[in-house]
Image (cartoon, helix red, strand yellow):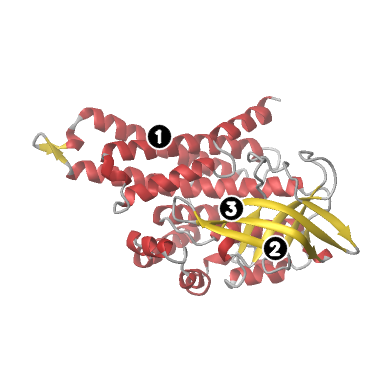
Amino acid sequence: MDFSFTDEQSMLRDTVAAYLADHYTIEQRRAATAEAGWRPQVWRAFAEELGILGAAFPEDLGGLGGGAVENLVIMEAFGKALVVEPYLGTVVIGGGFLKHSDHPRAAELIGRIIAGETVIALAYAEPQGRYNPAAVTTTARRDGAGYVLNGHKAAVAGGPWATHLIVTARTAGGPRDAEGISVFLVEKDAAGLTTTDYAVVDGSRSSEVGLQDVKVGPEALVGPADHGLPLVEKVLDEAIAATCAEACGVQRKLVDGTVEYTRQRRQFGQPISNFQALQHRMADMFVEMEQSVSMTLMATLKLADDAARPAAVAAAKVRVGKACTFVGQSAIQLHGGMGMTDEMAIGHYFKRATLIEQAFGDTAYQLTRYERLAFD
């Protein structure tokens, strides 16, 4: 199988990398996360200067004709720079729901995403859900032609900056039934919608979302009523593949930073990179990283195949999750206690790798999912 990028994809990678090298140093990121949590001017640059917010959308929706591989290229570059701007929630997830659902306003809303005007966050997780997208107790009852939403959504990544939320709600069935789930696009300033915003350990921002008698019109429904779970699972798999790509960028920086540090740190009159035991550990880190890259590419290429997609994505997340843990912890060990200090970049990458392992289902959850999909 050919894993090489096209000329256009290579150009996209180089363009994003060059911009981030100039505008997204670890010091600039640290300042941004200490204040508002993101930089709106960077988001505008993604839209206006680089045009990358449209790279993964088809041309008939105003995009540049790319797809999942373009998301991989961008997310890997973002992982290397620890970008906190909400590309995943807005382009991959929000855009994914719109383009896969035949929503009547899809072209308009995707156009606003590409222009940097609409920012979307996914509100699917609930406190008792344990990563299961079918574990939905938030309700949406009919109210004339529209719906009234009530419930609580937890850990909504990028929630503080969103203009819209993608909300999963139960329109029929029991708390964990596969049937009876519907998806809604809700404006964040809707009456009855409240948020509690907070900083996460890696410097990003999330929200707890309360929905109390939030009224939405029929146009808020995304996908089929009562049968939205397959759409949710498809978009979540695309988000997992993109997050794995981000993890590959994070792991590469952890590996490269550790190798560079061991070449500079001296003990017993020589660089500690000369010690064979440490060389073995760094070789293992490199192997784990390369396996993550290969599994992520394979999963990304299978996203269009609905039969093969779920197992491929689950397998990739398991492999990437294990690698994030091993590479991150090894990097900290080889740096010593100073690796966890805020002054050193390696600690920020370790924190991000730790959260990626848990995103959209931790290693144990995805391993159980893979076993069910592959062997049932």
| Residue wearing tag 1 | 326
Callout 3 amino acid: Ala
Q: Considering the image in quadrants, where does the C terminus appear? A: top right
Whether residue 56 is visible, yes or no, is no
The x and y percentages for residue 241 are 56, 46
| Residue wearing tag 3 | 68
- Look at 72% across and 41% down and name the residue there: 135
The x and y percentages for residue 45 are 48, 72
Find out whether the residues at labels 1 and 3 contact each other: C-beta distance under 8 Å.
no
Helix, strand or loop under label 3: helix
State the CA–CA distance, disc 1 to disc 3.
27 Å
Viewed as shown, does residue 144 lie left or right of 8? right
Decide: few, some or many residues near mark 3? Use Cα within 10 Å; few <14, some 14-19, many ≥20.
many
Mark 3 vs mark 2: in front: 2
| Residue wearing tag 2 | 193
- Look at 54% across and 60% down and name the residue there: 87
Find out whether the residues at labels 2 and 1 contact each other: C-beta distance under 8 Å.
no
State the CA–CA distance, disc 2 to disc 1.
40 Å
Decide: few, some or many residues near mark 2? Use Cα within 10 Å; few <14, some 14-19, many ≥20.
many
